[in-house]
């Protein structure tokens, strides 16, 4: 049968916060919008929707993290269900995340004879300074190998130290290695699982399971649905990307179609209920911006109630190093700028998993 109505907003899998309505009596009161012919009798969870010019609205209270909405046309008897989420701990929080990481681990391994601490490494030591100054939570997405080094060579002598700092420092799978680009764009379930397990097993060996979490950013953010299922089955419940659409930038959008990419680009977070995977959009690729343009860029995002709820400040490892062909001498200043921007606007440090999984 032809559907007698269409749900306009929210869409199935949308993850809402207080900016999508108002808090009232411990609930989130939000508006559900449905398109239907004039004269329809639409209800949402048995609440009658009010119609005007073919647009029907119903004010619904979200009481839990997971909320089932039953939208019905009482005239035809047609019913449709969607599941949406209320994120109570989402807005006003941030993290710093780093992609393409392996060289700092190689340095620690090569200097294990005289590094007394993992923070003797200049890169990791700098991020500890950021944490000490601003309380920043730091998430590091790592490769398994690079020229002349792989994670099996990483000593476990610092394991207690990694575990002691797991409250602000996490490691997760990024890819097997830096090249080729888009390594998982056509990957099978087994290929993704193989590479993930290689990295995760080594992280657990040398740093402890405490530093692992249920979030990662896949290298180039392109994957098959089978590949994303493999990550989910290994415990990765939130996958981060760019979700570019309607522009000339790489999609970095996993397996999602244009409609879903547009929704995430606008709202920052969405859950594929069919696959049980949350997708989240990074706020800024910090190394892509000149230092003096970072604050204006973030200020613009800050005016958008959905893009500015939770801020993920992403940067890549390689630009830290003077020997790298595209070295950015103001790398430290860029990281300090985003952390300071967050602090001055009363954003609180928080891992992404603590904000989207409950």
Image (cartoon, rainbow, N blue to C red):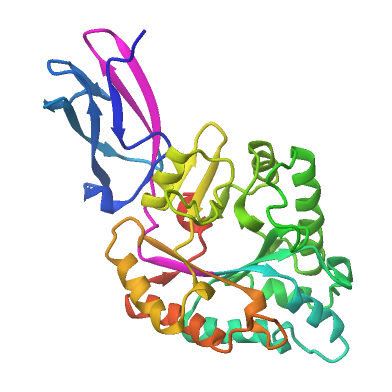
Question: In the visual, does 318 lie left or right of 167?
Answer: right
Residue 273 image position (x, y, % from top left): 50, 34
- Residue shown at 18%/31% (left/top)? 57
Seen from the viewer's position, the closer of residues 106 and 117 is 106
Residue 248 image position (x, y, % from top left): 48, 55
Residue 112, by quadrant, is bottom right
Seen from the viewer's position, the closer of residues 97 and 319 is 319
- Residue shown at 36%/20% (left/top)? 80
- Residue shown at 54%/48% (left/top)? 253
Question: In the visual, does 6 lie left or right of 130?
Answer: left
Magenta run includes residue 68: yes
Residue 114 image position (x, y, % from top left): 84, 92
Against 192, residue 155 (above or below) is below
Seen from the viewer's position, the closer of residues 79 and 258 is 258
- Residue shown at 30%/24% (left/top)? 6
Against 254, residue 330 (above or below) is below
Residue 208, by quadrant, is bottom right
Regarding residue 94, the answer to whether it shows in the image is: yes
Start-end of magenta stretch = 67-96
Magenta run includes residue 176: no
């Amino acid at each position: 049968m032809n559907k007698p109505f269409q749900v306009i907003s929210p869409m199935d899998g949308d993850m809402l916060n207080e900016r999508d309505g108002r808090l009232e009596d411990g609930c989130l009161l939000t508006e559900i919008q449905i398109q239907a012919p004039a004269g329809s009798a639409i209800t949402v969870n048995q609440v009658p929707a009010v119609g005007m010019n073919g647009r029907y609205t119903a004010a619904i209270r979200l009481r839990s993290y997971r909320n089932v909405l039953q939208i019905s046309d009482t005239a035809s008897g047609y019913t449709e269900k969607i599941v949406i989420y209320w994120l109570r701990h989402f807005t006003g929080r941030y993290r710093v995340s780093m992609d393409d990481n392996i060289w700092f681990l190689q340095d620690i391994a090569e200097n294990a004879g005289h590094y007394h601490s993992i923070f003797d490494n200049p890169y990791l030591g700098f991020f500890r300074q950021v944490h000490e100054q601003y309380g920043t939570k730091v998430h590091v997405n790592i490769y398994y190998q690079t020229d002349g080094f792989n994670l099996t060579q990483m000593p476990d002598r610092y394991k207690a130290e990694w575990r002691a700092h797991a409250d602000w420092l996490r490691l997760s799978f990024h890819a097997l290695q830096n090249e080729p680009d888009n390594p998982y764009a056509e990957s099978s379930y087994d290929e993704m699982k193989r590479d993930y397990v290689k990295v995760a097993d080594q992280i657990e060996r040398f740093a402890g399971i405490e530093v692992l979490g249920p979030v990662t950013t896949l290298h180039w953010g392109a994957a098959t649905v089978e590949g994303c299922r493999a990550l989910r089955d290994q415990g990765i419940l939130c996958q981060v990307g760019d979700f570019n659409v309607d522009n000339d930038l790489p999609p970095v959008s996993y397996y999602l179609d244009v409609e879903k990419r547009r929704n995430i680009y606008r709202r920052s977070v969405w859950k594929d209920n069919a696959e049980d995977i949350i997708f989240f959009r990074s706020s800024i690729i910090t190394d892509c911006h000149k230092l003096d343009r970072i604050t204006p860029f973030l200020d613009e995002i800050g005016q958008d109630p959905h893009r500015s709820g939770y801020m993920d400040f992403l940067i890549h490892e390689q630009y830290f190093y003077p020997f790298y062909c595209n070295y950015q001498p103001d790398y430290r200043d860029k990281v300090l700028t985003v952390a300071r921007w967050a602090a001055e606007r009363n954003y609180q440090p928080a891992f992404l998993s603590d904000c989207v999984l409950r």
